[in-house]
Amino acid sequence: MKSKNMSSYILDVLTYLSTIITVFALGLILFFLIREGSALIRPSLLTSDYFEQKYISSLPDEYELYTGTLPELTEDQFAIDNYGLIVEESRDKAGATVVRVVYLSDNSPLRNLLNENPAFQNEPLSLSEGMVINRVAYENRGSSLPSRGAAAMAEEMNNTDNIIRQFDFGVEGGGIRGSIIATVYLILMTLIIALPVGVLTALYFNEFAPSNKITNSMRSFIEVLTGVPSIIYGLMGVAVFVPLTTSLFQINSSNLIAGALTLAVILLPVIIRTTEESLRTVPNSHRFASLALGANKTQTTFKVVLPQAFSGILTATFLGIGRVIGESAALIFVLGTAIKDQVRILEPATSLAVHIFTVMSNEPANVELAAAIGVIILTIVLI
Amino acid sequence: MTNTPSKSKKSRVFLTRTDRITRNILLGFGIISSSFIFIIAFFITLEGIIPFVTDNDGLGTVNLWRFLTGGIWLNGRTFVSTAYGAGYLIIQTLYLAFLSLLLSFPIGVMSALFIAEIAPKRLANFMRSVVELMASIPSIVYGLVGAGFFLPIIYNFGQLFGISSAAGAGTLGVVLVLGLMSLPTIIAISEVSIRSVDPSLKQASLALGATPTQTRFKIILLAAKNGIFSSAILAIGRSLGEATAVALVAGNARSGPNFGLFDITSTMTSMMLSGLKETTGIDFNIRFSVGLLLMVVILITNFILNYIKRRIGNLDEV
């Protein structure tokens, strides 16, 4: 009897322990993502480019100093009145001090710079907000460097005795703007393709299909799709949609449309099932009432039944968005893993999930950036 | 569920000309949707058999037997050889999937038992949202946590015992990631089936003097075993097909099979993801062959597991 009690006790403890492990696992995932990613999560991550860029420029021979006013400064910001510029001090990924532009007036002379790079001799160049200033060299004295702090740089630039000889600035890199845009494109295009097909299919099955063997097997064919791993969809995208779109649009690379088509097939079973579930909740009395009033079946279906299924379609849309954001394997196959800053629909690009895969596969893996993107993905999915 | 009585009533409605046109258009969409599974199967088969039936631009055909049983992914110099072997990938894929189930199944089922039977209502609701949250995390994030968090720990742990591992990547990492990832699937489905156990069974057991713990483990779990087994089948299916998360932690072994917990490993999916640069030729097509193989393995595994499930049977029917 005693051993019975003992085993019961152990089983109870194991049950509680399992539950704790489950909660702990989720906590661990969230804790890890936030700990690693929090340093990078700031607006500039979302709006800046992935690839670092550096410009060496000079001011034109004759330029006018800025004379207007500047907006209010917050803490840690420094105004450079002569150039209509406000900068702040922050740190880059390696922990070094950088001077970032937070405000630049439209009339600032720094909007009209000349490219000193021999390849782009004297082409116009403009500083803009979010960029970092790498060096300011003067005619008559030593350069201002970001390592000496934003305050020192502001002071030296404000001194009208100092004539700027060379102005080096750039984009810090490591941003995910391109991937965000690509993800948005993918979501929109996928839904535009998948929603009509899915909803109309659901309408057919629920309103028009005769209940016979053919209908049942058609349903099961769609149901089978849910069990297909996404990497297989990726293979299909490469084999079917990439050749299809390249010949259709006369281009020679993979493209976001092929990616969206692939994702649309992945979403189809989800959309069909969710829509059908909500179509089933529409009471038959509504259908009969509409028919009795003289409406034909088409009118009944589209004007009476379909509007009532709206909530189901909305649910399907949200499920679809979540799936598109989280999908990685299929997109890696169709679109590749090359991160793009300039996203075009007829060119490949990476979604946020693929961006994580790319930076994690690089040597060395950029865990901080990946975790930051992970936090962003989770935030979107959970909302 | 599809053959509700109202269905037959509905189909007797008189269809006008417009209605017939509408029906045919909608039927067209229905046919498109249900044909994708065949499009997938057809095109992957089409591309996947090319390495075995053509001479691959003079390289010669791939030996099917060697492909199915080989222990080295590619013999000889890459791109000029047809000596592909994927047999070890099949073994490793199945090994990893079942090992991860070994980790997630007991934890998942007991957590489900806790949620369905023990937890007070509020705690149960909290646990359900925990599970929902875990289910909504994309797999790439699990892979990221595996690569960023587990691998360094595994590496240090290995060092402690004098085992050197490839920066921690390998079997143990994959098992942890896959186990974590299949946990919400197992909990959610097991919980539903545990809750749907007939309460009279539980009451009868308690009335006969069994303790609540005995009732839970000997009666309720047994009665819900059909649903619990289904959850395991789904979890295995997900593990077999998972690609990116596994690729981040596997270490991508090009020969095998490796069974050691600290050895690097690889699966069919991770091998398909490696070396994506090619767009034509045998190195491209061989990925379709592996994809075809993966589909066959998943189908066979599902078939066998469902057969076992049927053999074990359901207590309700006894």
Image (cartoon, coloured by chain):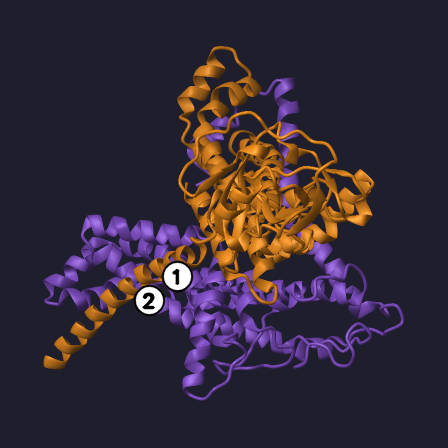
Chain colours: A orange, B purple
Residues indicated by labels 2 and 1 sit on the same polypeptide chain = yes
Q: Looking at this view, is A205 or B264 the one in front? A: B264
In space, the residues marked 2 and 1 are separated at their CA atoms by 8 Å
Left/right of residue B43 with respect to residue B104 in the rendered view: right
Residue B98 seen in the figure = no
Q: Position of residue A238 (x, y in %)?
A: 72, 53
Frontmost residue, A78 versus B46: A78
- Where is B177 relative to A102, above or below? below
Q: Is residue A362 left or right of residue B94?
A: right
Circle 2 sits on which residue? B107
Q: Badge 2: how crowded within 10 Å, few (<14), some, or many (20+)?
A: many
Q: Residue at x 67, y 63 (%)?
A: B292
Residue receiving disc 1:
B183
Across and down, in percent, residue A179 comes to 60, 46
Mark identifier at residue A357: none
> In the rendered view of the protein, which quadrant contains the C terminus of chain A?
top left
Image quadrant occupied by the N terminus of chain A: bottom left
- Residue under mark 2: which chain is it in? B
Q: Residue at x 74, y 63 (%)?
A: B48
Above or below, B277 against A372 in this view is: below
Q: Residues within 10 Å of mark 1 (few under 14, many from 20)?
A: many
The residue tagged with tag 2: helix, strand or loop?
helix
> Is residue B110 or residue B21 the one in the foreground?
B110
**Which residue is the extreme one toward the bottom?**
B162
Helix, strand or loop status at disc 1: helix
Disc 2 or 1, which lies upstream in sequence?
Answer: 2
Residue A227 falls in which quadrant of the image? bottom right
Q: Nearer the viewer, residue A290 or B47?
A: B47
Mark 2 touching mark 1, by CB under 8 A?
A: yes
Q: Label 1 marks which chain's residue?
A: B
Kindly identify the amino acid type of the residue bearing the numbered disc 2: Ile
Residue in the image at 58% along x and 59% along y: A359
